[in-house]
Image (cartoon, grey):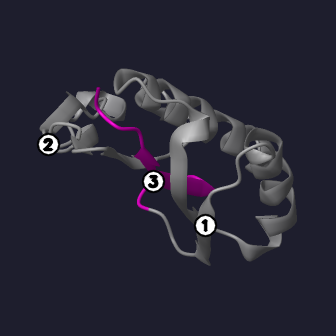
Amino acid sequence: MSQQKLIRYDTADTQAGGTKRPFAKAVRAGDYVHISGQVPTVDGEVVTGGIVAQTEQVIANIKSVLALAGCGMEDIVKVNCWLDDPRDFTSFNAVFEKHFIDHPPARSTVQSALMVDAKVEIDVLAWKPLD
């Protein structure tokens, strides 16, 4: 049986202007790794472009945070997605499918205004037993 641990991976990157954010990028609780909501930012700035470019950046950010915990996309069991505009749903799905076709997770997707000027935010739950 694996050890039960609580591990916090890095604090979130600073926002534009250098404002610190008060949460971890990810937290491992035993065999589960909870990845904080990722938005399409690089160095605190939202990437330009539409839903396709922004979804690709969010997934790149998720991969980066997963790596901190020794996880990959194949370890994701649940995904929560927030879209600013429901008209982006089909294009969002096309990008999502490309990255999850071999290991589809459970998923929820809702429309919601986001806290940053972005089109998409995604958080994930991964499962990878501690050795």
Going 46% across and 29% down the picture, which residue do you hit?
71
Mark number, residue 116? 3
Q: Earlier in the sequence, mark 3 or mark 2?
A: 2
Mark 3 and 1 residues: CB-CB less than 8 Å, in contact?
no
Going 70% across and 54% down the picture, which residue do you hit?
104
Counting labels gives: 3
Q: CA distance from mark 3 to mark 2?
A: 35 Å
Q: Which residue carries the number 2 mark? A: 4
- Does residue 39 appear left or right of residue 6 in this picture? right
Q: Quadrant of the C terminus?
A: top left
Q: Percent from the top left, x then y, of residue 109?
A: 62, 72
Q: Nearer the viewer, residue 67 or 45?
A: 67
Going 31% across and 29% down the picture, which residue do you hit?
13
- Does residue 109 appear left or right of residue 37 in this picture? right
Q: Nearer the viewer, residue 63 or 39?
A: 63
Residue 55: quadrant of the picture? top right
Image height of 70 relative to 54, above or below: above
Mark 1 and 2 residues: CB-CB less than 8 Å, in contact?
no
Going 53% across and 47% down the picture, which residue do you hit?
76
Question: Which portion, as a residue range, is magenta?
Answer: 115-131
Q: Percent from the top left, x then y, of residue 101?
A: 81, 46
Mark number, residue 107? 1
